[in-house]
Image (spheres, grey):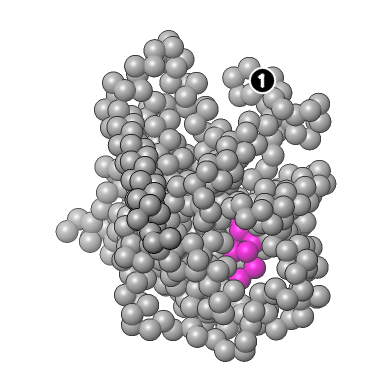
Amino acid sequence: MDVLHNLAFGFGVALTWQNLMYCAIGCTVGTLVGLLPGLGPLATISILLPLTYSVPTSGALIMLAGIYYGAQYGDSVSAITMKIPHASSIVACIDGYQMTLKGQTGLALFTAGVSSFIGGTVAIVVLSFFAPMLGEVAFLFGPADYCALMLVGFVCVSFVTTGSLLSGMAMCLIGVLLGQIGTDVNSGMPRFTMDLPFLADGVGLVSIALGCFGIAEITKNLDNRNERTPFNGKINLMPTWAEFKRIIPSALRGSVIGSFLGILPGGGPVIAQFAAYAVDKKVSKYRDEIGSGAIEGVAGQAAADEAAARTSFIPLMSIGIPENAVMALMMAAFIIKGIQPGPNMIANHPDLFWGLVASMWVGNCFLITLNVPLVRYWLSVFKIPYAVLFPSILFFCCIGTFSVNNNLDDIYITAVFGFLGYVAMRLDLDAAPLMLGFILGPMLEENFRRALLLSRGNFGAFFTRPISGTLLTVIAIFVVWRVAAVFLQSRRATADALTAPL
């Protein structure tokens, strides 16, 4: 009852006309930001942060939060329609773009919108009821536990890849190696930079994502004149009842996964989308269709993405620890307004905490009413001749890449990865495992080295800690099961070949 009372109090704060206006502005700007390749919520919040000086505290934080979770849906639109992802919509390129190639773009965008609404709603419930308690979960995870969690992420390669497991593991390894480029965190020495100064900070995630997906897809379309993103003038927006029944379970699974991974520092939407996709590919009744344009491949990752974006506020507001760069900027916004996020925030600033929580659900309603009716307008881009469309896409890719660091070298790096992505497409190699390896590799290395430093080189620390030990046991069971499955499948194929009539 206390939670319901607090939520009612929060809605009283969020539903003032002023805060409603700021929430609507944040959601609208966030959606538009998500549509632009490479820009993302981080750059936008950085630009708008100084404007919060002249905006009331609750309105400023509600607006910045709206930009963050509003951008998650905008990310899906560009990934589904044009195969141009942001970091949090890489998985949407797999099944979402396949649905576009089948002429089901409207259904894919509707699925992403509804699933995002479900994921956001579930996360808000988790945020409301369990924020103070779940914030302490982050304290239970040490470096060894995070290392084991990253290894679980690598297990997802067998589910994320649309090709063979061997090629998926190879692409993942390439991603891990790319993640090692830059300056070593511990020693401060450059690694694999080839004495090029612009590689001292490593290769940007935006450059790899836009190159391997966006530019590579454009190059492929130009190389094959018969292959274009189709638009037949018909928009099948509403799913059938059978399709809707496929959306709900996947969206709920993704919501739970995203809500949990959003709490953990280093988790967030990027990891949540891969985890939700891997789970769907394992437990869904239609898992054989995932990877070739299945609704589940869009619904699960969209729900996990949106849920993780909201629950990532839990560590910030309950224990004062930002789990990613966007949350660090949000923390800066809190401090600018004279508020110190942490355990005492709920008690000292209940209007701000519960008003922000309630505004997330209001923003959820804004997003679904804003974006689902606009699907028809998003699809109108396909009416533009491709000869006009592809230079525009390349222009926005270059602008988005440049805006991250204001460095022309990033554009050259994007072009290189565009060529490599095109070569990978022609060789039937999937870029999604490469992105997974690039994201998880540095995190795995950092936590592995930190765990060994704390344990003074004792590898037993990975097995004696309850969390890491349990995760490693699960990984071992999964690997043994996969090897046994491959062995039995090979034996069965050999037996069938021997018994087949000549």
**Image location of residue 190, percent across then percent down:** 71, 23
Q: Residue furthest bottom?
A: 234
Left or right of residue 384: residue 179: left
Q: Quadrant of the N terminus?
A: bottom left
Q: Residue 213 occupies which quadrant of the picture?
A: bottom right
Q: Secondary structure at mark 1?
A: loop
Q: Residue furthest left?
A: 1
Vertical relation: 96 (above or below) 55: below
As for residue 85 lying within the magenta part, the answer is yes
Work out whether residue 16 can be spotted: no
Left or right of residue 452: residue 384: right
Name the residue type under label 1. Gly
**Image location of residue 27, percent across then percent down:** 53, 66
Q: Quadrant of the C terminus?
A: bottom left
Q: Residue 195 occupies which quadrant of the picture?
A: top right
- State the count of labels: 1
Residue segment shown in magenta: 79-88
Q: Residue 462 occupies which quadrant of the picture?
A: top left
The residue tagged 1 is: 188
What kind of secondary structure does the magenta stretch mostly adopt?
helix
